[in-house]
Amino acid sequence: MKIARSVLIVFLLLMPAFAWADDAVYRYPIDDSYAATILGTPQNLRPDTRVEVPVKTMVLETDQKKPEIFFYDRGLRYTVAFQDRKAPLIFLIAGTGGSSKSAKIVALITNLYHAGFHVIALPSPTFSNFIINASTTHVPGNLPEDANDLYRVMEQIWSQSKGRIDVTDFSLAGYSLGGTEAAFIARLDEERKVFDFRRVLMLNPAVSLYTSASRIEGLLERIPGGPRRIGAFYNRVMEKSTEYYRKGDFVAIDDDFLFAAYKAQILNRDEAGGMIAVSFRISSAGMIFASDVMTHGGYVVPKNRELKNSDLLEDYFWTCLHLSFLDYFNEYFIPYLQNRRPGLTKEELLEALSLKSIESYLASSAKIGVITNEDDFILAPGELDYLRRVFGPRLKVYPRGGHLGNLEYRDNMAFLIDRLRSSTW
């Protein structure tokens, strides 16, 4: 949906001011966690990756039957960057609603290719293209099932790719929800031994899918009128950004404009948090719509309605935008699973959708490590201490960076690559 791209642009433009920190130990400059999440890393503090990377978008054809409304979807889209020599191969898993060419995936592809890796990037199981083409249930969110789907896709892609590249060993990394899913994929690989991953990196993972989603959704409580006024909030943000751009002496949406926008404090901190939550809602909206159409669930689209390629989808988009991930979870996801597994309680399901369900494996596997931030707001109180207890020296915690805001900071990227190369933590 084109409107999602507009919101994402606004999401990048509008942020509160941040302080440039003078920290002798860690010099990522953005102190505020929301500003860090929105702004990311200033260009001059990223690694030098000016050499061209041979990035290609590939399509894995599937035999999934698709409703007419998805006529344009010819298969699962994934992204590769292959070396012309023998090299290690790393699989990347995108975060919630992310494609294989989302901004953070592209940054990882670029840096890892420059570091000498073959790279294969996959979309999130919550991305509509994956739901339509690669999900066995078309109902994302069940971490063990999503891991099975991802692993099957990885096998299929490797089967098609191995004749083209020479590989020394395999690694795996994912960010946000993709980081959490990487843990479940790693455990699955211990049983199947197709890849025998040498290293698995979880970047800013959620400990509990439900808890992290709740914390992001909670950011909408701080906007005027709360979640019910999300449409008015979005429109007001659009007006603010358009007016600021119109009055300013800007020739492009570039670093100059971005920094001018945040210095002008177009949004206060609560509004910035609201925009993070709106971006999450947009990802959830695509997920809910695709799942509902593929399963004929009747949650958004009436069960007896067969959408055609000429049908307008704007009303469905706004309906989905007003549904939170928690609405999806409680009203759609839980009933679906309870229908398959009578007697399943919400408490049992929440436990299964958490790293705690595979804690003994994570605590004992020397190949798995975690990189996160002290101020990552998707972690609930106590969850960072949980990660410290489970992973010990295999956990790296930076003092600031919000949720993935410091991913492209050159010191972070150098450490990430070093951990992938190193034989020890």
Image (cartoon, rainbow, N blue to C red):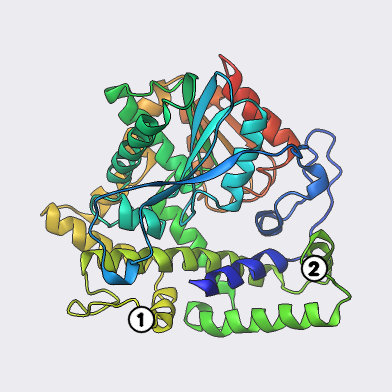
Query: Which amino acid is tagged 1?
Result: Ser
- Residue placed under numbered mark 1 in the picture: 310
Q: Residue furthest right?
A: 249
Residue type at tag 2: Ala
- SS at badge 2: loop
Between marks 2 and 1, how big is the CA–CA gap?
34 Å
Q: Classify 193 as above or below 375.
A: above
Compare marks 2 and 1 and give the one earlier in the sequence: 2
The residue sitting at the top extreme is 423
Q: Is residue 174 above or below residue 159?
A: below
Between 120 and 233, the residue placed more toward the observer is 120
- Any mark on residue 252, and which? 2
Residue at position x 50%, y 50% in the image: 380
Front residue of this view, candidates 120 and 322: 120
Q: Quadrant of residue 49?
A: top right
| Crowd around label 2: few <14 · some 14–19 · many ≥20 (10 Å) | few
Indicate left or right for 371 with 250 as reference. left
143 or 309: nearer the viewer: 309
Residue 121: x percent and y percent? Answer: 49, 41
Going 13% across and 59% down the picture, which residue do you hit? Answer: 339
Residue 53: % across, % down: 65, 38
